[in-house]
Image (cartoon, rainbow, N blue to C red):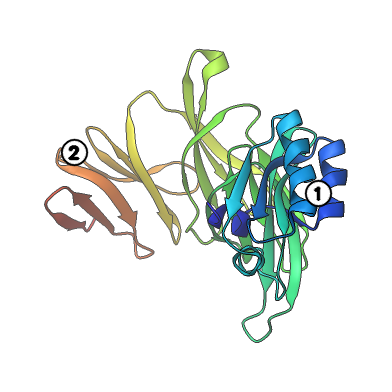
Amino acid sequence: MLSELKTSRKLVGMKQIRRALQEGKVQKVFLAQDADPALTEPLAAQCEAQGIPVCPVPSMVELGAACEIDVKAAAAAMSQDNGSFVSSLQIYKLTSETMAAEGTLEGGVYEMGTVGGRFCAATDKALYFVKTDGTVTSYDFQGASLSRCGLGADKFAAVLLENYASGGQTHLAIVNAAGEEISSMAVDSEVLDLSAAGRYLAVLYSNKLVIYDQKLRECAVLEDVSSARRVLMRSDGSAVLAGTNAASLYLP
């Protein structure tokens, strides 16, 4: 439960949370059980009136730690802007405890990685690329649902998107670090898994494994994959296939 605060855009403090509640920008509120009831009970009542879930936390110390601050916290909230959930990507240097930059991302984070020297995060709304100075570029999913993604390649990210508004059509898109679509293709077969590394993308279908380049040109195909359920692309062009009871290395 508290882990949500570490990956989400958060608000700490009664005044900030009350203001955000008035503006309709709160998704969930966390209240410390050992805090002064004179402070927490009115806030809990306001949340109940607005239909905002309230999660109890045993202590202010624990809540402060979950918010990654060095002081106690009586209340904290997961925020949302204009009725949509937002997340915060915070960048730190390994040599410092001070945050170097922060990027705001729409939606909950599904997976993170690095692409083209930028931090990359896939949410349920878009693919985001964040520079070390906090500059954000994005590739919007245009209402489609994220099914799977591969964020481990050198210069691109791969996303498998399902558009239920268009009859459940599925397509695979390759996106560079500038948020530009390099290539895409319709997918008719069931995709069990996908993984990207180096210059390649591995897509494990129900009946075969295909390794593509960033233009979605087939580089290699393995037909006998009936026992495989997961795939891990390697930067040298090989791929690890894993099933319930065994794993194997595919060398094209």
Q: Is residue 201 visible?
A: no
Mark nearest the camera among 2 and 1 is: 1
Residue 64 locus on image (x, y percent): 67, 67
Rendered view: 73 above or below 107: below
The quarter holding residue 84 reads top right
Asked if 244 appears above or below 237 in the picture, the reply is above
Q: In the image, what residue occupies the spot 68% across and 81% down? A: 97
Amino acid at dot 1: Ile
* Residue identifier under label 1: 17
186, above or below 249, in the image: above
Q: Nearer the viewer, residue 102 or 97?
A: 97
Circle nearer the N terminus (2, 1): 1
- Image point 66% across, 63% down: which residue? 67
Percent of width and height locating residue 105: 70, 48
State if disc 1 and disc 2 touch (CB < 8 Å): no
Q: Secondary structure at mark 2?
A: loop
In this picture, residue 138 sits left or right of residue 190: right
Q: Residue drawn at (66%, 69%), measured in percent from left and top?
A: 68
Q: Secondary structure at mark 1?
A: helix
214 with respect to 89 (left or right): left
Front-most of residues 23 and 120: 23
The residue that mark 2 highlights is 223
